Amino acid sequence: MKVARFHAPGDIRIEDAPEPVAGPGELKIRVRNCSTCGTDAKIFRFGHHHIRPPRVMGHEIAGEVAETGERVQVIAAIPCGTCEECRRGRMTVCPRQESMGYHYDGGFAEYLVVPAKVLAVNGVNAVPDGVGFAEASVAEPLACVLNGQSLARVGAGDDVVVMGAGPIGCLHVRMARARGAARVFLVDVNADRLAMAAELVRPDTVIDGDPVEQVLKLTGGRGADVVVTAAASGAAQEQAVLMAARQGRISFFGGLPKDSPVIRLDSNLVHYRELTIVGANGSSPAHNAEALRLIAEGAVPVADLITHRLPLSRVLDGIDLVSRGEAIKVTIEP
Ligand SMILES: [Zn+2]
Ligand SMILES: [Zn+2]
């Protein structure tokens, strides 16, 4: 079978590999769609400290169980299920978390084997009728968005600002609508990307000027109830704090580059305005199941966000499209 293997930064190869064999407690999957995201682009450029090459990449996985043909979606982040955090139900912050496509071969392949650890935490979900494999593969990033918005308590009547108009930003806009947000504002420094995203997800307003000034103006000086930074930008995080309303919640959804993770924060704003700043670290198996349900019910449509479908041989083109910000969602069909 064909696979796309990461060997070193800048070196991903399409190679022939023997079909994997499922051991006891494992599950062999015929991959139908594995979507790409900013993380794949980052791994391609810089590698990742959890990837010991060579490794088959791809973590947004949907396909068929090889033996039965059952249509399934597979989680990406694998909690251990047994540590203190996992037992307290905080699976997204399991310190022993592993990931498909990092610690185990991922979905840029015709077949993959789901490790027993994934099955042990209910990490394989049946895809509901009427949901295609490409849509099902987007359940994983949507699950991360769901985790971020539940931590930031996005709810009815909220004015929500999403900073970053990439695929994750688009999913945040859709999720905020599903959770009853009053208005959603979409911000990006790249006007073309902002226009492309806005065309699809229709925020109430797009902001490409000074976002703090604009948000304060749009909210009569009050600020936004929730601000989500869906970009690896310290400047966006600093602006997010400045545009939050009293008792506002700020989600630092996107992480910052390892070599510059420090921002300037006026802690008195947090103190006097009773702000809440939350992080977000992937998603739990339960978030994945819920995301799939939201897609199936039509609460969060994702089919129209899939702008490119490419064969496995064109994985590198897909990653290139993602890094240049010219696509919303690129999915690989091995
Ligand atoms: Zn991803
Ligand atoms: Zn754990």
Image (tube, grey):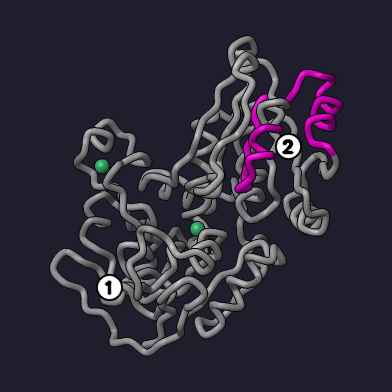
Q: Which residues are magenta?
A: 210-239
Query: Measuring 24% from the left and 47% from the top, which residue is drawn there?
Result: 80
Q: Quadrant of residue 252?
A: top right
Q: Is mark 1 within 8 Å of ligand 1?
A: no
C-beta proximity under 8 Å, tags 1 and 2: no
Does residue 292 appear to the left or right of 113 in the view shown?
right
Residue 55 screen position, x and y as percent: 36, 72
Q: Quadrant of residue 16?
A: bottom left
Residue at the left extreme?
24
- Which of the numbered marks, if any, corresponds to residue 39? none
- The residue type indicated by label 2 comes to Val
Q: Quadrant of the N terminus?
A: bottom left
Nearer-N-terminus badge (1/2): 1
Query: Could you say which is closer to the camera, residue 159 or residue 56?
Result: 56
Query: Measuring 49% from the left and 62% from the top, which residue is drawn there?
Result: 137
Q: Is residue 42 visible to us here?
A: yes
Residue highlighted by disc 1: 28
Q: Secondary structure at mark 2?
A: strand
Residue 186 screen position, x and y as percent: 75, 43
* Quadrant of the image where one finds ligand 2: top left
Residue highlighted by disc 2: 184
Would you say residue 208 sits in the magenta stretch? no
For disc 1, the neighbor class at 10 Å (few under 14, some 14 to 19, many from 20) is: many
- The residue type indicated by label 1 comes to Lys
